């Protein structure tokens, strides 16, 4: 088996966790460099590599030294949101395949630069959107592929995660989210829910997102939290955070399908990506883990639906995604219920086999663009904003001419 060389740029919470996953579970991947702006984090990561392999990797606070490493096949960009795209572009220019952690973009221009860099260098770039590999999402995707829900009409998803502690303590914990919530009001984390939905709606492959509108609520959650946490005289108790507590974005697709995204990270709540799929033959709803198929239940039961709540597991035997069937047989491993392993494995496999990654630069640009465009819409009072076609027309493949033998 060919050994792949990689390096990590950004070894805070996520980068260090993924690094450990690679060291423990990816025998064909060798980590030859680690980088973080904070020297202590880079050193801790280098210690972990040395302890596991006996070889100390390059340890640096300057990512340029990582990109200059000789023989580096790919790089894991696991740093904070603001520098994902600039570093990915530099990596592609250096001939190194980037795997980029999730987040949203800060300008449409930087996304075009990303796409143009790929088109000029032909070095593929993958967004490491682990939620595309979650067991539930993949089963629903399989059911959609098999036509169980009919033609999809509307989808919903959200990043609904109580992050009040992480955001509030961002300064002392050296975490980037605090600054983002002070200065920016947008759908700042769209891809966890949008990634799977975009795949279900074939975005980039016969469909595309054409426009959106977005609105944010007022911002109160962090103040309430900080009044308890810091006391009423604490500097965040009354601070006017710019990021609204709940941001709702409605996207319209080329054939009229709609997607509602919800960002909900600063109020007390349970975790949920709130996936809802509605097609002409049925629906799935994550929060009650239920599937409703037309004609399968008595009409009168429409009003006694609680009877069927939680029934989605009944569909597992028939519709478990093949990727998950094998994963369950081999033994599920890795963080976030196994999806971290699956997404990283898919990335490293594409690097080893020199194939296109399953989540490519066009997916990445369109999914990440929502962060910029929702910000524009909110600033204009919820006005419609057009979503660029980063494929320049390739999404509908106009000349699908069969190859001659
Ligand atoms: N997919 C998931 O389930 C998941 C989970 C958690 C975090 N994440 C993502 O992972 C990324 C990192 O999140 P985190 O929670 O680890 O944040 P973190 O703040 O703990 O770590 C980020 C690290 O990147 C470093 N960094 C920033 N800019 C850098 C640069 N130019 N060069 C080198 N190092 C740099 C910072 O010093 C910091 O140590 C984010 O994009 C986040 O959204 C994804």
Image: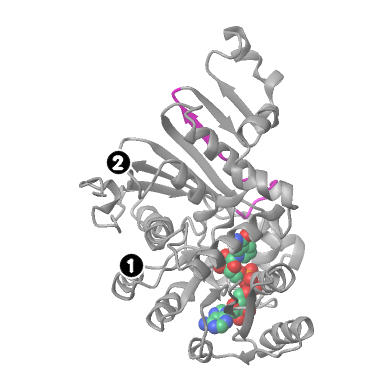
| Res. 239 in view | no
Q: State which mark lies toward you, 1 or 2.
A: 1
Which of the two discs, 1 and 2, labels the residue nearer the N terminus? 1
Query: How far from the left and from the top, in percent, is residue 120?
Result: 29, 74
Q: Please give the residue where the numbered disc 2 appears in the rendered image.
A: 254
Report the residue at 55% width, 46% height from top.
158
Mark 2: secondary structure: loop
Mark 1: secondary structure: helix
User: On the image, which quarter does residue 140 sit in?
Assistant: top right
Report the residue at 50% width, 39% height from top.
156
Height in image: 69 above or below 7?
Answer: below
Is 175 on the left-hand or right-hand side of 211?
right
Tell which of 348 and 353 is nearer to you.
Answer: 353
Asked whether 270 falls inside the magenta stretch, the response is yes
User: On the image, which quarter does residue 123 sit in?
Assistant: bottom left
Mark 1 beta carbon near ligand 1 (under 8 Å): no
Query: How far from the left and from the top, in percent, is residue 297?
Result: 61, 13
Is 53 on the left-hand or right-hand side of 315?
right
Query: How far from the left and from the top, in percent, is residue 379?
Result: 37, 57
Q: Which contiguous range is marked in magenta?
A: 265-280
Q: Please give the residue where the numbered disc 1 appears in the rendered image.
A: 115
- In the rendered image, which quarter contains the N terminus? bottom right
Query: How far from the left and from the top, in percent, is residue 167?
Result: 64, 66
Per the model, the C-alpha gap separating discs 1 and 2 is 21 Å
């Amino acid at each position: 088996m060919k050994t792949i060389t990689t390096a990590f740029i950004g070894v805070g919470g996520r980068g260090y966790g993924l690094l450990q996953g690679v060291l423990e579970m990816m025998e064909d991947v060798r980590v030859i460099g680690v980088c973080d702006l904070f020297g202590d984090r880079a050193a801790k990561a280098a210690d972990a590599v040395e302890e596991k392999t006996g070889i100390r990797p390059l340890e640096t606070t300057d990512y340029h030294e990582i990109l200059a490493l000789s023989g580096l096949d790919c790089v894991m960009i696991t740093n904070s949101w603001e520098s994902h795209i600039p570093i990915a572009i530099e990596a592609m220019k250096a001939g190194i395949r980037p795997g980029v952690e999730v987040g949203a973009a800060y300008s449409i221009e930087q996304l075009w630069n990303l796409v143009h860099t790929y088109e000029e260098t032909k070095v593929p770039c993958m967004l490491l959107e682990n939620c595309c590999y979650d067991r539930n999402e993949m089963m629903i995707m399989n059911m959609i592929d098999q036509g169980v829900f009919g033609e999809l009409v509307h989808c919903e998803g959200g990043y609904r995660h109580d992050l009040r502690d992480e955001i509030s303590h961002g300064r002392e914990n050296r975490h980037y989210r605090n600054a983002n919530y002070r200065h920016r009001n947008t759908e700042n984390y769209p891809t966890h829910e949008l990634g799977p939905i975009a795949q279900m709606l074939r975005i980039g492959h016969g469909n595309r997102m054409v426009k959106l509108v977005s609105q944010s609520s007022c911002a109160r959650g962090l103040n309430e939290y900080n009044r308890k946490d810091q006391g009423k005289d604490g500097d965040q108790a009354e601070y006017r955070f710019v990021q609204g507590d709940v941001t709702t974005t409605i996207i319209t697709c080329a054939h009229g399908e709609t997607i509602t995204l919800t960002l909900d990270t600063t109020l007390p709540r349970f975790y949920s990506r709130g996936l809802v799929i509605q097609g002409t033959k049925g629906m799935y709803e994550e929060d009650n883990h239920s599937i409703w198929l037309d004609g399968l239940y008595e009409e009168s039961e429409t009003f006694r639906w609680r009877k069927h709540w939680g029934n989605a597991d009944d569909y597992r035997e028939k519709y478990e995604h093949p990727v998950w069937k094998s994963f369950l047989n081999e033994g599920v491993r890795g963080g976030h219920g196994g999806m971290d392993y699956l997404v990283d494995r898919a990335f490293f496999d594409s690097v080893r086999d020199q194939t296109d990654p399953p989540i490519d630069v066009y997916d990445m640009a369109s999914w990440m663009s929502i962060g910029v465009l929702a910000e524009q819409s909110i600033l204009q009072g919820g006005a419609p904003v057009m979503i660029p076609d980063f494929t320049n027309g390739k999404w509908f493949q106009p000349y699908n001419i069969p190859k001659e033998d």
